[in-house]
Image: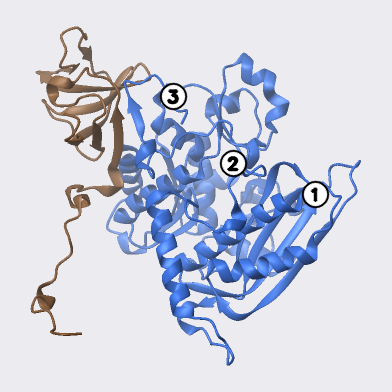
Chain colours: A brown, B blue
Amino acid sequence: MGFPSPAADYSEQRIDLNELIRHPVATYFFEVDNDLMKEAHIPSGARLVVDRSLRPASGSIVVAVVNGEWVIRRLKVRGTERMLVAENPKVRPVPLNGEEADVWGVVTYIIINGREV
Amino acid sequence: MIALIDCNNFYVSCERVFDPSLQKRPVIVLSNNDGCAIARSEEAKALGIKMGTPAFMIGDLIRRHHIKVCSSNYALYDDMSRRVMQVINEFIPRTEVYSIDEIFGDLAELSFQLPSKLATEIREAVRRLTGIPVSVGIAATKTLAKMANRFAKKHCRDQGVFVADGPELVKMLGATPVGDVWGIGPRYARMLEQHDFKTAADLVKAPEEWVRREMSVVGQRLLNELRGIPCLPFQPAPAAKKNICTSRSFGKLITSKREIRQAVATFTSSCARKLREEGSVARKVHVFIQTNPHRRQDEQYFHSITLELEVASNSTGELLKYAMKALDLLYKPGYNYMKTGVMVLDLQPASEVQLGLFDQQDRAKETRVMETLDELNRCFGRDVVRFGTQEFNKKWKLKQEHLSRSFTTRLSQVATIGGKKCSTP
């Protein structure tokens, strides 16, 4: 061994993207297979980081279950009315009632392959 | 006070978290090799499917009621279990994981909180963060907490919480048949009923000497537990394992030695991996093979052998050498084999290994090779890098025809939104 590294005392852990995940216990991953939320920067093929510990607010992008199926929607709250709205005018908004339509988790990050954009 | 928190129909609940179309539908989860029902949704229970019912006996019922059948997906259940336990740990620091879906919590230091309120908060947090419904029983001892949990499931489904205290405790004891008391097997239950001890309340009043005479010291302890005197110790950390066993029935009967070698090699490498995970080494390797005792038409063979290693080890290569030698001694051609298994025994911490005086092997190098192997398999999936003896074409492999994805442990298998497939990989 030649010279000791002058940087040895300053070495740090390399960046780990998991640091972005604030609640690992409540965080889950999904993959998107349609273009209904393209306008919300979620193209087909995107991966979603979803946190169940967060309370969805108006404007949150959420993973929801509507009639037993997964959907991604934006939550819009107006007064007491809570609606799941797609970023696509062809998809009808669905009122959130906790039964046939319920929020599963809040989307915290969207991962897109930079070479496929 | 002690809490017992238990996940409701845990395996079914895990499947439902990632396949929302299963809500309100009857669902069952099958044991290894898609054998028997080991978890049932409430809807499936209502159809009369009992615990342990073999799948082939209820084919008709499954078709008629569109029952969703799942192979057991232990990778998923294990991760969901850890999530549930972690959430609970944030509320109760001192806990004892009792099984994959049950955990005891010591509330002694949380006495400033109202137990029923704490229980409700835990229940809601677990539900919100993991999607898994749980029931909570709270009482003075483990045995009573277990009973309270059962009572909560039976009689307070909506709240999912039962605190057995004061008049509530009396009510619970009176409503619990002796056979349902934790620790009383069918034989003791029959004996107790013959002596007119029908419920837990009857048993609490039993004379101590009689219980000790008829049910030994175990009965005495049970009696104390039922009377609210804790006798079962709280064990926060799991006791160090004495041995590790991997065994499985084949998906079909197997005669060829080559296929059995594959199975033994795979089980050995799984044992070795578990040893390395917990930083232990094994002194002995035990291998067994057996035919199917239920097939009267077949000639039967069961044999096992234990070999001692020169130097205790957790290296796959080293353990394989001994396991293969054991199999050579065990195997006899001409039988229809159903099951084989590998056990590693006499475990000790890897840091305390005594080297052999004439040991020629480079143990440090071996350790590095194993670390690399584990790292590769962690990144790319179990057994992607493996020893040649394990081979590829696994005919003996588990039957898992209805397996859901590894939703939480493999990036390539996460749930898809918008696609047609929901649960099939």
Which residue is the extreme one toward the front?
Answer: A2
Query: Would residue B21 be visible to someone looking at this image?
Result: yes
> Is B197 or A66 nearer to us in this picture?
A66
Counting from the top left corner in percent of width and height, residue B322 is at 66, 70
Counting from the top left corner in percent of width and height, residue B424 is at 47, 28
Secondary element at image label 1: helix
* Alpha carbons under labels 3 and 2: distance apart: 31 Å
Specify the label residue B194 is tagged with.
Answer: 1
Amino acid marked by disc 2: Ala
Secondary element at image label 3: loop
Q: Earlier in the sequence, mark 3 or mark 2?
A: 3
Specify the label residue B54 is tagged with.
Answer: none
Does B83 appear above or below B14? Answer: below
- Identify the residue at horizontal 50%, vertical 34% (top origin): B12
Q: Nearer the viewer, mark 3 or mark 2?
A: 3
Amino acid marked by disc 3: Gln
Query: In this rendering, do the residues under marks 3 and 2 share a single chain?
Result: yes
Q: Earlier in the sequence, mark 3 or mark 1?
A: 3
The residue beneath circle 2 is B175
Chain at numbered mark 2:
B
* Alpha carbons under labels 3 and 1: distance apart: 44 Å
Amino acid marked by disc 1: Gln
Chain at numbered mark 3:
B
